[in-house]
Amino acid sequence: MKHCVLLFLLITLLAGCSPRKPEDRIVDSAPNRVLDPNSIQDAVPRAEPRSRYGNPESYVVFGKRYRVMRSSKKHVERGIASWYGTKFHGRRTSSGEPYDMYEMTAAHKTLPLPTYVMVTNLRNGRSTVVKVNDRGPFHENRIIDLSYAAATKLGIIGKGTGLVEIQTIDPAHPYQTPVAVQSVAGATPALFIQVGAFSSRMNADRLRQRLQSSLEFDVRVLPGLRSNSEVYRVQVGPVKNTQQADALSQQLAQQGMNDQHIVIE
């Protein structure tokens, strides 16, 4: 549920903190203080300068390089959210601010710091606004790590993870309503793991056939467009839940499928 969040390697140019060791993740937990989700206020978007320490061009964690986005404008993303709590409370975040699990904040691997985002739980329709001021979560199938307060408001504390959509907010126009999220309360989102996107249908079909022979899940090729060019996406699923997605992700990694991401429909 919890995993390395706080900090990444700022190479040698910045005297930042190193990411936590894997064993550091398992001792995170919720505090004794229980919050009322109905009384938790959203973060208030405001224009802020980019963090001096939190926005290198790129950084490396656990051997993988992440490239920080130059702009967060109109960024929309769906995936699995996790949360972090007592283990990191009071520690320095990637932006230099101390982490406060009772504040409405979050960690993201590539959004500029800080960025304000609206996060919507795709299973119950709840939404909240958080300030992204940290790096993480460094897990292949997670897109955002929420503070304890934010996770409480969205209703994902008990399960540890949730299916979410995030939409960035322009601080210059914070009260503009983001695009309505589809497939929320009352629906059952379907999870797929995308393992490749090809300009050649033949290459996509070749990968599909190779994976289908070794997996218990269906493998599909989904035609689409990217930059006005045809693209064929190879996706495995649907899977039932986050735990099944994590197990499948490990199986795919063992077959050399290291460029994966969750697709939610």
Image (tube, rainbow, N blue to C red):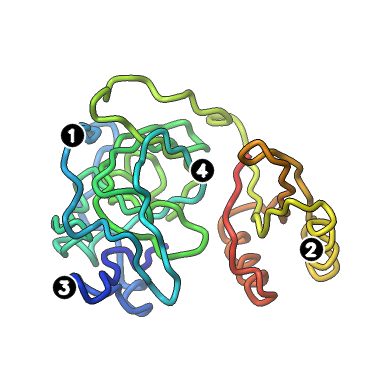
| Alpha carbon distance from label 1 to label 2 | 45 Å
| Alpha carbon distance from label 4 to label 1 | 25 Å
Q: Name the quarter where the N terminus is drawn.
A: bottom left
Residue marked by disc 1: 47
Circles 4 and 2: CB atoms closer than 8 Å: no
Tally the marks.
Answer: 4
Foreground label between 4 and 2 = 2
| Alpha carbon distance from label 4 to label 3 | 33 Å
Residue 115 sits above or below residue 204 on the image = above
Residue marked by disc 4: 78
Q: What element does badge 3 sit on? A: loop
Q: Amino acid at mark 1?
A: Ala
Residue under the point 58% across and 64% down: 246
Q: Nearer the viewer, residue 31 or 44?
A: 44
- Across and down, in percent, residue 211 comes to 79, 66
Residue 243 sits above or below residue 48 on the image = below
Residue under the point 67% across and 69% down: 252
10 Å neighbourhood of mark 1: few (<14), some, or many (≥20)? few
Mark sitting earlier along the chain (1/2): 1
Left or right of 11? Residue 122 is: right
Q: Which mark is residue 15?
A: 3
Q: Amino acid at mark 3?
A: Ala
- Across and down, in percent, residue 55 comes to 26, 56
Residue 14 sits above or below residue 71 on the image = below
10 Å neighbourhood of mark 2: few (<14), some, or many (≥20)? some
- Across and down, in percent, residue 159 comes to 46, 53
Foreground label between 4 and 3 = 3
